[in-house]
Amino acid sequence: MGQRESSADRYEYERKGLTQDDFQLSAHRSLLWGGVAAFLQRQQGSMSKHDIGLIGLAVMGQNLVMNMANKGFSVGVYNRTTETTHEFLKGLGSRPAGVVEAGAAERIHGYDSLEDFVNSLAAPRRVMIMVKAGSPVDAVIDQLKPLLAKGDIIIDGGNADYTDTNRRHKQLAEEGFRFIGTGVSGGEEGALKGPSIMPGGHPEAWPFVKDVFQKISAKVGPNGDIPCCDWVGEAGAGHYVKMVHNGIEYGDMQLICEAYYILKYGVGLSNRELFEVFREWNEGELESYLIEITRDIFTVQDRETGSDLVDLILDTAGQKGTGKWMSQHALDLGVPTTLITEAVFARCLSAQKDARVRAEAVLKGPDAKFTGDRKQFVDDVRQALYASKLCSYAQGYVQLDAAAKEFGWKLQNGPIALLWRGGCIIRSRFLEDIKKAFDKNPTLENLLLDDFFRSAIEQAQPAWRRVVSTAIQLGLPVPGFSAALTYFDGYRRGRLPANLLQAQRDYFGAHTYERVDKPRGEKFHTDWIRERRLS
């Protein structure tokens, strides 16, 4: 990032109505002060003070700590259960090579009391919380506040509900603390080797955490030096972006599962054939982390039975709530995030395993078998998957834009795509194309309107329609594919049947309607019973 202007600083200056020249002067001063402040911190007892502290030593917390230490940072750690702290520290020396690098273990120190932990941190203290979302985060914050000084920085790195982050940001700012809510994506491996990090909250806190976050984050670009971490926006913006990331993740996973389902149970491909299909797909435009791990899954055999493990796994999907949160807020905003919502409902339906088994014995559907060109149809599924993914991302960005307008956030869609380019679960090749689309047109209304994506959709459309219609004829559920296609068909039509819907609403509830031949905003009502002609 170097001398590039800080988003947080830019937002603050725009809010104050200052000019670009004012901003540039301040930016130079900030760089100078940041260097001086860092030097003074190191001089004032730096040998005994940690750069950052982390609370919560579950797997993600442990891996983030080791990542920080591997990057040269001194880290203090605390866990409510002291045995967990001791076991973590004791086990550092036995970690495999590459997990804990030379000298890293010496930079990690554990504390049995929260007070000792806080006192071990350099000022301004940077405390990252990695505990279960919800009330546990509030409990830790309440315990921290009496021990911290004004201006200290509290970071929530869990999968928090953005509304909680909005509340905590406001409350802690009023009390003199600087709060950051940051999304962290990449799972266990990402946390250790480089996650995608999406920080938001108090703008003044960003310069103090930027060095740590950008060093430990994933890196992309031609030289592998662009961090998948940058300031997102104020209040709950960071956790909102992470929520949308997770919603898109829900959609991606559902679409991949539907592709698998069609090919296995519709076309009859073996797991070995599925491995070859996904291996090939991962070498083209579908290249992504999720396609890659799906490929790998088809190679794993159960050690007990020798059968393919994927076939032995019960078909009931779990969820932690972020996809649901996105769908709920989509309804609040009035935006059609249909594919992701269908992905959430698909998990809900999968959870009704016993009911589905009972229904299978009673309810009958098509008994047809696929009889077409297998090779061509496999390619059709590839194109349908790609087109549906485009719709999923398009819906996600539409919701981001709506949320930014709702909360006054200045989200930057192109840089957000870059944050997701590496480290995170939805990382994929075509995020580069998404970034290019927003770089070309930062105010792009919908990704589907970009020339690249419009052309891609047009090319895939015939195959996409064949896949959805074939799946329906075979009686195979494809809620993701069909929701994406229905969204596309709805979005591309200038006239929908909502005119009749409004007539119905006005008929039974006098809700009024607008007319195509009158100015927008002008309302009309008809006495339908009086005006109707039944003969």
Image (cartoon, helix red, strand yellow):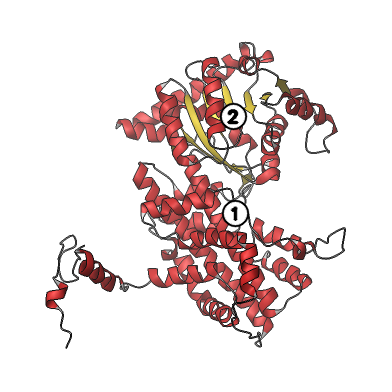
Residue wearing tag 2: 128
Residue for point 63% across, 57% down: 317
Residue for badge 1: 426
Looking at the image, residue 306 sits to the left or right of residue 530; the answer is right
Rendering quarter of residue 429: bottom right
For label 1, the SS is loop
Percent across and percent down for residue 407 are 36, 42
Q: Which mark is residue 7?
A: none
Task: Please name whichever residue, 253 or 192, is drawn nearer the observer in this view of the structure.
Answer: 253
Callout 1–callout 2 Cβ contact below 8 Å: no
Q: Residues within 10 Å of mark 1 (few under 14, many from 20)?
A: many
Query: Disc 2 marks which amino acid?
Result: Met
Percent across and percent down for residue 487 are: 43, 68
Q: Is residue 472 visible?
A: yes
**Can you tell which quarter of the image residue 490 is in?**
bottom left
Residue 18 appears in view: no
